[in-house]
Image (tube, rainbow, N blue to C red):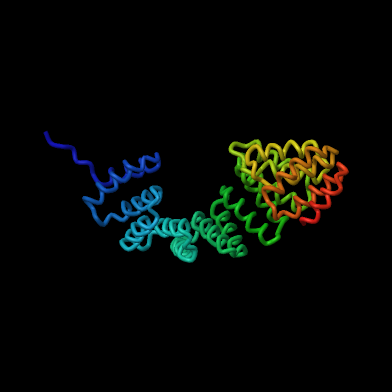
Amino acid sequence: MRETVVPSTQKLTRAIEKFQQRDLRAAEASCREVLAEQPYNADALHLLGLIACESGQGRHAVQLVQRAIALQPNVPLYRNSLGKLFASQGAIDESIQSFKDAIRMQPQDADAHFNLGNALCARKDFTSAESRYEQALKSNRNFPAAANNMGIAMMAQGKIERAIAAFRLATQLKPDYAEAHANLGRALREKGDHEAANTALQIAAKLNPPPRDSHGPIGDALLAQGRFVEAIAAYRAALRVDPSLVPARINLGSALRQLGHYDQAVEILSEAAQLDPNSAEAFHNLGNALRGQYRLDEAAVALIAL
């Protein structure tokens, strides 16, 4: 009985399917079957490079994708993949060049513009990054990550109003985009619109999974409005997620002090000062809380430590 021969194209299709299913071992096996029959199959080499990257073999991944490019130099997808591989290894200049090569071959490639924007942000060239995110959105209007990252680049340039508009666009395109809601909240807080900031940050905190520090910014917005009871609840929630958050601990102590809960404030602020002995803000607030207890000598010691 003759063994059924599976064409290389079907094997490559199976490799892609297994890769998408995160079955890396099966995907690699199928790729190697293709390359055993067709050693110069660029698509198989490219996919094998992506598999190597997912397996933690970054350098080998670069070599495999470069081999694919050597065989087919005019495929923008390969250049885009190479750029992401370089970026993951911190080779920012090389990643920028790869993304530019991809864009030269396919000027309307939204992903390439987005990836180039990310690489430019890593180099702190926020002006150029902003224009790339804008181009990505022109090529693909339904690209929430591009809108969000454009807002981040704008914030870095002090363009608060435009950043707010970008973050709003990101949340409109993807209503469950927790990071964009959190960024919108931070931008609104920077503008001084604490009520709207609080709303955005609360939405971020409710989404699953929430940003790790979403409760802290909510507390900051509530504290700025004098809503001390709600701010205390937010800071306590932040500290349950990450007890090492010194700013949340300091602001919790400040809110407690505002309500006259000096004992709790002293305890919290003492912990903050222990966690960060170089925090002038922690010692300043601790001194004020101790004065509220009429422990003037200890308050003086805390304030001298500034």
Query: Residue 9's x, y, as percent?
Result: 28, 46
In this orientation, which residue lies closer to the viewer: 74 or 304?
304
What residue is rendered at 59% in x and 58% in y? 134
Q: What is the residue that sits farthest to the front in this orientation?
A: 297
Where is the N terminus found, in terms of image quarters? top left
In this orientation, which residue lies closer to the viewer: 265 or 169?
265
Query: Residue 218's x, y, as percent?
Result: 72, 42
Where is the C terminus found, in terms of image quarters? bottom right
Indicate left or right for 64 with 205 as reference.
Answer: left
Indicate left or right for 83 with 172 as reference.
Answer: left
Q: In which quarter of the image is residue 207?
A: top right
What residue is rendered at 32% in x and 63% in y? 70
Q: What is the residue that sits farthest to the top in this orientation?
A: 1
Q: In which quarter of the image is residue 127?
A: bottom right
Q: What is the residue that sits farthest to the right in this orientation?
A: 294
What residue is rendered at 13% in x and 36% in y? 2
What residue is rendered at 51% in x and 57% in y? 115
Query: Residue 72's x, y, as percent?
Result: 33, 61
